[in-house]
Amino acid sequence: EVQLLESGGGLVQPGGSLRLSCAASGFTFSSYAMSWVRQAPGKGLEWVSVISGSGASTKYADSVKGRFTISRDNSKNTVYVQMNSLRVEDTAVYYCAKDHGSPKWKYAFDIWGQGTMVTVSS
Amino acid sequence: QSALTQPPSASGSPGQSVTISCTGSSSDVGDYNYVSWYQHHPGKAPKLMIYEVSERPSGVPDRFSGSKSGNTASLTVSGLQAEDEGDYYCSSYAGSNNLIFGGGTKLTVL
């Protein structure tokens, strides 16, 4: 079964750090770009970051650029996001998501995890 | 990049058709055929309904269709069913590996 499972969410103070993980199974992980997408309470979806299948290419939304770092370990079928200098406005459910296309990206996510909640509060 | 513009709500009776719009700009929706639509039920993972403007992933009923004209994309749900209720989000590639979402539309089946 194709599956993504996020972990690592929790409560952190403003200015703190957190690392989220997303374990993949059921597909050739290294062949697909992976993204993180978040949803703040009562708000819509917001794309956060993407990493290519090889890990050589990464991109970030302006709202997290310079604070978040996406990475992946294809030997462990896992994608990560390191979140530093966290702000109250980073509070959200964070989803990892698999791109629908390979090798050409389709910028569409056909598999999503269930999400992990990150709360930034003092 | 600003979020794509969607109506906050849409509704229809069972069996009817409803269309949800998604308006962007010439830098995103108008410039690329990488428009997607997702169905999202609170507490669950979003589900891909349409990609590349009008393509349906396997398993998505053909009651769901997508189109684009200029800077506006649309999702049409025909033969509305109770299970179609939920939040619908559009997204579009915006160049340089950036992606933007719409604000979401709550679809109610009356």
Image: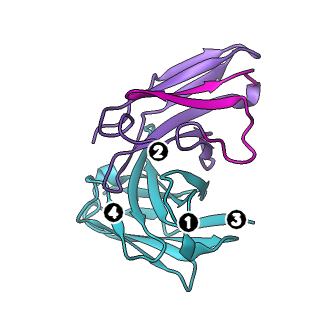
Chain colours: A cyan, B purple
| Badge 1: chain ID | A
Three-letter residue code for mark 2: Tyr
In space, the residues marked 4 and 3 are separated at their CA atoms by: 25 Å
* Mark 2, secondary structure of its residue: loop
Contact, CB < 8 Å: mark 1 with mark 2? no
Identified at 63% across, 46% down, the residue is B47
Query: In this rendering, is residue B54 above or below B76?
Result: below
* Mark 4 / mark 3, whichever is N-terminal: 3
Q: Residue B34 carries which label?
A: 2
Contact, CB < 8 Å: mark 3 with mark 1? no
| Badge 4: chain ID | A
* Mark 1 crowdedness (10 Å alpha carbons): few <14, some 14-19, many ≥20: many
* Mark 3 crowdedness (10 Å alpha carbons): few <14, some 14-19, many ≥20: few
> What range is drawn magenta here?
B55-81
Query: In this rendering, is residue A91 above or below A13?
Result: above
Labels 3, 1: front one: 3
The residue singled out by tag 3 in the image is: A2
* Mark 4, secondary structure of its residue: strand
The residue singled out by tag 1 in the image is: A6
Residue B53: percent from left, percent from top:
53, 38
* Mark 1, secondary structure of its residue: strand
Labels 2, 3: front one: 2
